[in-house]
Image (tube, rainbow, N blue to C red):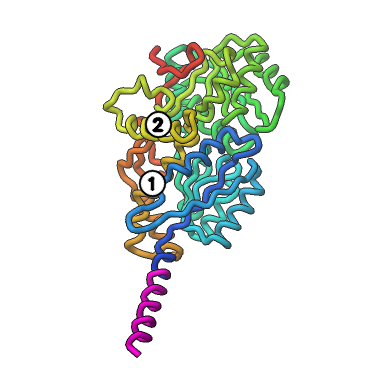
Amino acid sequence: MKSTYRMSAALALAMAFAATSAIAQVKVGVIASTTGPTAVVGIPQKNSVALLPRKIGDLTVEYIVLDDASDPTQSVMNVKKLLAEQKIDALIGPSGSPNAVGVVAFMAESGTPMLAPVGTTAVVLPMDDKKRWVFKTTQNDALISDALIAHMQKTGVKTVGFIGFNDPYGENWYNVFNAQAQKAGIRIVASERYLRSDGSVTGQVAKLMAAKPDAVLVAAAGGPTVLPHTTLVDAGYKGRIYQTHGAASPAFLTMGGAKVEGAVLAASLMLVLPEIADSTPSKKVAQDYVAAYEKMYGTKPATFGANVYDAGLLLQRAIPEAAKRGKPGTPEFRAALRDALESTKELVGTQGVYNMTPADHSGFDERGRELIVVKDGNWRLLKD
């Protein structure tokens, strides 16, 4: 009889432990564009998932990674699957700006925090009841644009030609840059758009050339950043060509070659780590990330991968706080996680320091950008 009692007690204890273990797992969905036009962005993001923490406090973390093939419709399908079947506690992704914009409503409806590693600020601004569930792990366009305009003013640029993606990334960049440029006395004399999948922008470049701007700004991300740049050079354009932080990838240098020499962009310190002072808060974090990525994959990561790595750092800070108010897998935990992310203060990431507020779900300040130029085929700090 005693033996039977002991077996029953042991079985009950084992079942209770199993149930506790199951509840103690945080599920994080990851959507990365590892195929299609945005793959230059998505591949280092997917690769970076392997470097994210598998245990945070007393909780284990599972990452469920899906590819959306750079297709916004597939992003929505993936999100619905992650929410319904996996019951995720948070989402990292998708990679592309249109993809991320397209899933915000679903994340908000489910009450699940989303960490968006994308360029467009349209996922977090203007803030509303839906976007309050989204946190952005890249610099807001205004922060980058401000640095580019300051350089334009310094070098005497008065007129600019604009060419950007025909999607939320390009449109938001135009709106932000145009407003700041007007205040700085800089006029946009030509504005063109192109698709991420386009193989030619000859017509758009012809119109830019006809306007004879002092400089051109390319507002794009990943591999497609190169096409307008090289087409302008081939057409004989002699002015300065600026890029956004969407060009901050090794692929920009390898695909563009000598034709992107002299390109100016404002982006993460990751591109120029050897030139960054040791006192800069993010330098060591960025160095550790680069070293871990290089050890695992034999190549240096693009800054796009760092956006996912930083999402992991944000979750590492927020999850223990959320666990005080609810158990993983519950609405209470997800709501508490959202609140904890919004309360992030002075978190040092790979690309800057995060200070989130109810109005600012990106949280970067000037510590999150450097002015950079392509010189001798490499990234260099721009000092002139």
Above or below: residue 230 compared with residue 238: below
Point out the residue furthest to the left here: 279
Give the residue drawn at x 39%, y 68%: 20
How many marks the image carries: the answer is 2
Within 10 Å of disc 1 (Cα), the crowding (few <14, some 14-19, many 20+) is many
Q: Main secondary structure of the magenta part?
A: helix
**Residue marked by disc 2:** 291
Q: Per the image, is 3 magenta?
A: yes
What range of the chain is rendered magenta? 1-18
| Residue 94, picture quadrant | top right
**Residue marked by disc 1:** 314
Within 10 Å of disc 2 (Cα), the crowding (few <14, some 14-19, many 20+) is some
Whether residue 110 sits left or right of residue 323 in the image: it is right
Location of residue 347 in the rendering, given as x and y in whole percent from the top left corner: 32, 42
Residue type, label 1: Leu
| Residue 269, picture quadrant | top left
C-alpha span from label 2 to label 1 = 20 Å
Location of residue 156 in the rendering, given as x and y in whole percent from the top left corner: 47, 12
Give the residue drawn at x 53%, y 23%: 243
Task: Pick the residue in front: 119 or 378.
Answer: 378
Task: Pick the residue in front: 44 or 136.
Answer: 44
Report helix, strand or loop for mark 2. Answer: helix
Whether residue 128 sits left or right of residue 191 in the image: it is left
Whether residue 45 sits left or right of residue 143 in the image: it is right
Residue type, label 2: Ala
Report helix, strand or loop for mark 1. Answer: helix
Q: Earlier in the sequence, mark 2 or mark 1?
A: 2
Location of residue 343 in the rendering, given as x and y in whole percent from the top left corner: 34, 50
Quarter of the picture holding the N terminus: bottom left
Give the residue drawn at x 42%, y 29%: 268
